[in-house]
Image: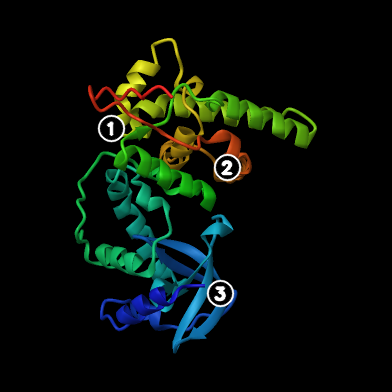
């Protein structure tokens, strides 16, 4: 259900002159519609309809998308599924094909937005004006754009989110670092999960092994480029040599950072939607495994970096 904040945001905008006339229509349960999500229009189906605070609200399912994207929306987000509106959708898809790529798969685009953000995006699209956003043309095909659209959604458990927040606080605000090398390291954690799945499934599956190898590969490549804070770079250069992989040195703290970046990284890989959904389920299962073993996988304390030479080395414990 939407929050009162979303309701107020919708109410404040519902009288706008720019809202298409078709949006004032009443929609029935089971009706096929067109729905705004961000700057795009998607085919959807009305699952439920309610009258809340004198405003009609609809729970919609985006056709062809995982049910995790289902949400409550107002009439300002919906249009009748007519030939005229389908043409409007197609024209908007063509126009957004270039603009979406120009944003370089920015992570903000992977998350469902609140009503205020969605309205702003819709008005930007209708007027062909970028309000408070820098948009520049880029060479990208619609085929490439399709891969960006099918972004995987990874729901990080709340207790692991707390680790991310604490991790940021320790490193950036308190000038502390994770002592390296970590034990268990990323390789150890991936191996433990593989053993866990083999025992639970009664067999060693190639699919799980391939996914874990992919995680390891992404981690090793992404760590020096995307997963380190500035204060950790010196420590990285000292701990990781040419013949040493980051996954054998770093642990759960940095592995968890990868899952924040993973939706954006995977958006550039050509993956069938059905495969994408299965991959999402496997990644969520892995995160639950990490959550279950967080006491053994994460460090309880960080060590203060030496301030004398600014090298990023940690004090001996």
Seen as rendered, the residue at the extreme bottom is: 54
Residue at mark 3 to residue at mark 1: CA–CA distance = 52 Å
Say if mark 3 contacts mark 2, CB within 8 Å: no
Disc ID at residue 230: 1
Is 170 in front, or is 50? 170
Residue at mark 2 to residue at mark 1: CA–CA distance = 26 Å
- Tell me which numbered mark, 2 or 1, is placed earlier along the sequence: 1
Seen as rendered, the residue at the extreme top is: 243
Q: Is residue 14 above or below residue 98?
A: below
Q: Is residue 129 left or right of residue 233?
A: left
Q: Disc 2 or disc 1, which is closer to the eye?
A: 1
Image quadrant assignment for residue 20: bottom left
**Element marked by disc 1:** helix
Query: Which residue: 38% across, 44% down?
Result: 145
**Element marked by disc 2:** helix
Is 292 in front, or is 94? 292
Is 310 in front, or is 230? 310
Q: Position of residue 165 (x, y in %)?
A: 41, 47
Q: Position of residue 223 (x, y in %)?
A: 40, 28
Q: Is residue 178 above or below residue 39?
A: above
Within 10 Å of disc 1 (Cα), the crowding (few <14, some 14-19, many 20+) is few
Image quadrant assignment for residue 77: bottom left
Q: Disc 3 or disc 2, which is closer to the eye?
A: 2
Q: Which residue is mark 3?
A: 31
Within 10 Å of disc 3 (Cα), the crowding (few <14, some 14-19, many 20+) is some
From this viewpoint, is residue 207 visible? no
Q: Which residue is mark 2?
A: 287
Q: Position of residue 38 (x, y in %)?
A: 36, 60
Seen as rendered, the residue at the extreme front is: 317
**Element marked by disc 3:** loop
- Tell me which numbered mark, 3 or 1, is placed earlier along the sequence: 3
Screen quadrant of the C terminus: top left
């Amino acid at each position: 259900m939407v929050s009162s904040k979303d309701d107020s945001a919708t109410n404040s905008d519902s009288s706008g002159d720019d809202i298409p006339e078709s949006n004032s229509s009443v929609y029935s349960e089971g009706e096929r519609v067109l729905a705004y999500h961000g700057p795009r229009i998607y085919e959807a189906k009305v699952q439920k309809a309610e009258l809340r605070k004198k405003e009609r609200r609809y729970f919609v399912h985006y056709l062809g998308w995982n049910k995790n994207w289902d949400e409550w929306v107002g009439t300002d987000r919906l249009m009748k599924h007519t030939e005229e509106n389908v043409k409007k959708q197609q024209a908007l898809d063509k126009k957004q094909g270039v603009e979406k790529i120009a944003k370089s798969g920015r992570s903000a685009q992977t998350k469902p937005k609140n009503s205020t953000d969605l309205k702003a995006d819709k008005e930007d699209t209708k007027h062909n004006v970028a309000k408070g956003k820098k948009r520049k043309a880029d060479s990208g095909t619609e085929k490439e754009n399709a891969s960006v659209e099918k972004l995987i959604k990874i729901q990080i458990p709340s207790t692991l989110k707390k680790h991310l927040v604490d991790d940021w606080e320790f490193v950036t605000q308190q000038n502390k670092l994770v002592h390296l090398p970590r034990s268990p390291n990323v390789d150890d954690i991936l191996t433990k999960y593989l053993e866990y799945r083999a025992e639970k499934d009664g067999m060693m599956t190639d699919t799980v092994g391939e996914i874990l190898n992919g995680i390891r590969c992404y981690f090793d490549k992404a760590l020096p480029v995307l997963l380190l804070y500035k204060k950790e770079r010196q420590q990285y250069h000292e701990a990781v040599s040419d013949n040493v992989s980051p996954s054998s040195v770093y642990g759960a703290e940095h592995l968890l950072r990868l899952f924040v970046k993973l939706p954006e990284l995977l958006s550039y890989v050509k993956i069938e939607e059905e495969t994408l959904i299965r991959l999402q389920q496997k990644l969520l299962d892995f995160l639950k495994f990490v959550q279950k073993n967080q006491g053994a996988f994460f460090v309880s304390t960080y060590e203060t970096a030496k301030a004398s030479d600014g090298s990023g080395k940690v004090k001996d414990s």
